[in-house]
Amino acid sequence: MSDGDKGSQDGQGGGGQGPVGIDELLDRVREGYERVGPDEAAAAAAEGALLVDIRYAALREKDGLIPGALIIERNELEWRLDPQGSHRAPQAVSRDLRVVVICNEGYASSLAVASLHQLGLHRATDLTGGFQAWRAAGLPVTL
């Protein structure tokens, strides 16, 4: 059996690599793009980037919202941001759109960015430390 065949059988799609743990998966995903800090995310938004809050409702109710951020829960993200999708958000106008994905602490957002990259949204990134880092930096939050 060739390495390519092994990759197909193990579900990894080539290369013969088996399953990895979540920490390694996050490291691999994050190697493919540059993450931003809170101040960079705020500056990107001021320059027209779309901030997307993927936290679930209970966290938003508990901790507040980032003014101007588009709320799209994680399970709807790809459908809402695919510019060619039938369920896209009005803001999802182009695959060239600069998107900063924000979760609570900066973990789920990295996996979400990997998925957006697969859809062709090559300028998608996420906020290191998530909403908690935004708030800790003293950036605007509404309750």
Image: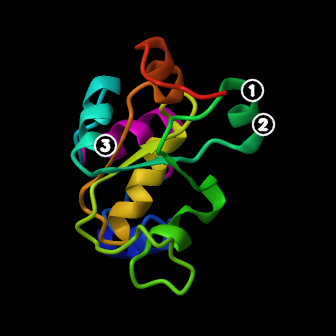
Foreground residue among 12 and 98: 98
- Start and end of the magenta stretch? 19-32
Q: Is residue 131 left or right of residue 46?
A: right
The reply to whether residue 2 is visible in this rendering is no
Q: Secondary structure beneath disc 3?
A: helix
Disc 3 designates what residue?
45
Task: Name the residue tied to disc 1.
Answer: 62
Viewer-side residue, 79 vs 16? 79
Residue visible at 45% across and 20% down in the picture: 133
Structural crowding at the residue carrying mark 1, measured as other residues with C-alpha within 10 Å and reported as few (<14), some (14–19) or many (≥20)? few
The residue mark sitting in front, 3 or 2, is: 3
Residue at the image position 75 percent from the left and 33 percent from the top: 61
Q: Main secondary structure of the magenta part?
A: helix
Q: Which residue is mark 2?
A: 58
- Marks 2,1: beta carbons within 8 A: yes
Structural distance between the alpha carbons of marks 2 and 1: 6 Å
